[in-house]
Amino acid sequence: MRKIISAVTLTLLLGLGVLTLPANTDAAKVINDIGDPIELTLNTGKLIKLDKAATSVFIGNPELADVQVQSPTIIYVFAKKPGKTNLFALNGKGVVLLNSPISIRHDVGSLEKALLDIAPNGELKAQSVRDGIVLTGFAATARISEDARRIAALYTSEKNILNRIVIEGSQQVNLRVQIAEVARSVTKQLGVNWENLSSGLGNFSLGTFVGRDVVGTGNLISRNGNTSSLFAGFNDGQTSIQGIIDALEDEGLITVLAEPNLTALSGETASFLAGGEFPIPVPQEDGAISIDYKEFGVSLTFTPNIVGNNRINLRVKPEVSQLSSASAININNIFIQSLLTRRADTTVELASGQSFVLAGLLNSDSDNNVSKTPFLGELPIIGALFRSTSFQRNETELVIIVTPYLVEPVNSRIALPTDGYVPPNDKDTYKDGKSFRPTKDAAVPKIDIDPATAKNNVKLIGPAGFIME
């Protein structure tokens, strides 16, 4: 009975909270930071002195930092990679002597000093974020922004660089290329051609033939291309003498002028082609023929880079090509024309609005041929009857000039080549023979200009559709 009363009493005491059982002394305990935070830059270290001797020292993430114990109370910590971790130190009884957070960053201090050299105004900043570096600020040119990125690449890999530098000012470049060529050719020919045949020597015949055939098949006089000819002949039934004097004097003049214009963003490549493509048959196996296409016309490819102080670095490749029958070939009865090409590929640097002679060519060649009959062609006076001369001279002068401009878009309307053109009606075409309808100034359509976009009715002067700085 006493045991039952004791059990009931114990239950009541526990319910009233008068009697409390001892707590579990084996429960886990979270140890908060003990010690000041440690801030390190990449590839640098610090010495830490402990108040008491430690028997165990370690880093939470050994990939980020390394620790060396110099003595029981002196610890050296070295930063290997950016990030955050903790440094721990314990004594022989397991008591935590040190639990300090470590923060490792890139050396943005020295990086910003280097950025100050390329941007003295101090508008470029660098920030260390985890494994990378963020560049911010304002740059006057794209070249400064690119230099800042390349300097930051010395501190981390390029893929870990975020370039958020804003480039101020105009970053578009318009390139004007002038390709001018003058070719002059002179050709002179003088030839004596004659045939002499005598059959009045019994059973024998005697003849002399100089130059080309005078009489062809069917007793027709043979002509020689575009030359002018003087023919004379004599025939008495036994002796036949026929001769032709060929003479030619030809002068040719060819001029080529191409002015392609192209606009591109700084650092970007732009290309332009005004021409076409002509087919080229390519023999394959089993007699099959495939078709390839070759571009021709006026083309331009360039890559501008603004390097500061209004200067532009240009990688430019202009080309002018045209179809020609010279050096043409014939494949399986297919006539394939050749291309006459003027091309340049180089890199230059100049300021906006300046011109540079990119390439030039001055070529002069001559060809003088004399055909004569041995011994007879060297005789005085009559030797001219046994000689033919041909002279040809070609002169070519080619100049390629480039002019870049820093440009900005315009808000007002840009003039077009078709402005003011009105197609002709039947009266203009058949009665007056005009290919366009003449218009007066009053008849030209007027264009409303929004004052919000073109203040004070400002218009461009000339054919250029951009603003030059």
Image (spheres, grey):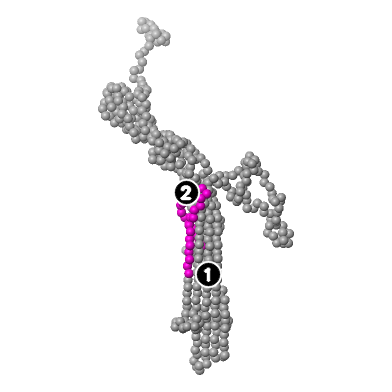
Quadrant location, the N terminus: top left
Q: How dense is the environment of label 1, judged by Cα within 10 Å: few (below 14), some, or many (20 and up)?
A: some
Q: Disc 1 marks which amino acid?
A: Val
Q: Main secondary structure of the magenta part?
A: strand
Q: Residue at x 55, y 65 (%)?
A: 253
The residue tagged 1 is: 186
Residue 45 lies, with reference to residue 191, above or below; the image says above
Task: Describe the element under mark 1 as helix, strand or loop.
Answer: strand
Residue 83 lies, with reference to residue 30, above or below; the image says below
Image location of residue 410, percent across then percent down? 59, 44
Q: How dense is the environment of label 2, judged by Cα within 10 Å: few (below 14), some, or many (20 and up)?
A: many
The magenta stretch is 340-366
Q: Is residue 40 left or right of residue 385?
A: left
Residue 47 lies, with reference to residue 428, above or below; the image says above
Assess whether residue 346 is covered by the magenta stretch: yes
Image location of residue 420, percent across then percent down? 67, 52
Quadrant location, the C terminus: top right
Q: Is residue 27 left or right of residue 231?
A: left
Assess whether residue 441 is covered by the magenta stretch: no
Image location of residue 353, percent across then percent down? 52, 49
Q: Disc 2 marks which amino acid?
A: Asn
Closer to the camera, 63 or 251?
251
The residue tagged 2 is: 313
Closer to the camera, 463 or 431?
463
Task: Describe the element under mark 2 as helix, strand or loop.
Answer: strand
Instruction: Give the CA separation, mark 2 to mark 1.
Output: 42 Å
For marks 2 and 1, the one nearer the N-term is 1
